């Protein structure tokens, strides 16, 4: 695990307090395997927040937009585990 991956993991863990460890690991794996997708999602969420939307509304809107790509990433991650 590189330094960048370590910091990404710690950041994600800090945002997912209360989420079961197994689910945290799945999310961390998704983000580290698909950094470009999640960077794009993060930037779009931040832009929506700057435009005046609340964090939750911005997140939901952007996540719906990328729902198909996220589902593909989940399926690919599960295939790679087997």
Image (cartoon, rainbow, N blue to C red):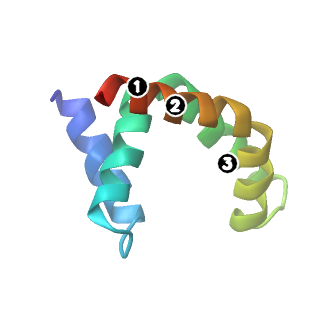
Q: Which residue is mark 3?
A: 46
Q: Which residue is mark 1?
A: 79
Tags 1 and 2 touching, CB below 8 Å:
yes
* Image coords of residue 51 (percent x, y): 84, 53
Tell me the distance, in whole angstroms, between the alpha carbons under discs 3 and 1: 31 Å
> What mark, if any, has residue 11 been given in the picture?
none
Tell me the distance, in whole angstroms, between the alpha carbons under discs 1 and 2: 6 Å
* Image coords of residue 45 (percent x, y): 69, 48
| Mark 2 crowd level (few <14, some 14–19, many ≥20, 10 Å Cα) | few
User: Secondary structure under badge 3?
Assistant: helix
Q: Residue at x 38, y 69 (%)?
A: 19
Q: Residue at x 74, y 57 (%)?
A: 60
| Mark 1 crowd level (few <14, some 14–19, many ≥20, 10 Å Cα) | few
> What mark, if any, has residue 75 been given in the picture?
2
Q: Residue at x 18, y 32 (%)?
A: 3
Vertical arrangement, residue 61 with respect to residue 69, above or below: below
Q: In this view of the protein, which residue sits in the foreground, 24 or 42?
A: 24
Q: State left or right for residue 61 relative to residue 32.
A: right
């Amino acid at each position: 695990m590189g330094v960048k991956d370590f910091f990404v993991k710690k950041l994600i863990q800090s945002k997912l307090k209360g989420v079961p460890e197994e689910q945290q690991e799945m999310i961390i794996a998704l983000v580290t395997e698909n950094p470009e997708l999640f960077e794009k999602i993060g930037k779009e969420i931040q832009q929506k927040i700057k435009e005046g939307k609340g964090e939750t509304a911005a997140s939901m809107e952007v996540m719906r937009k990328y729902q198909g790509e996220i589902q593909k990433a989940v399926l690919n991650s599960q295939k790679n585990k087997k």
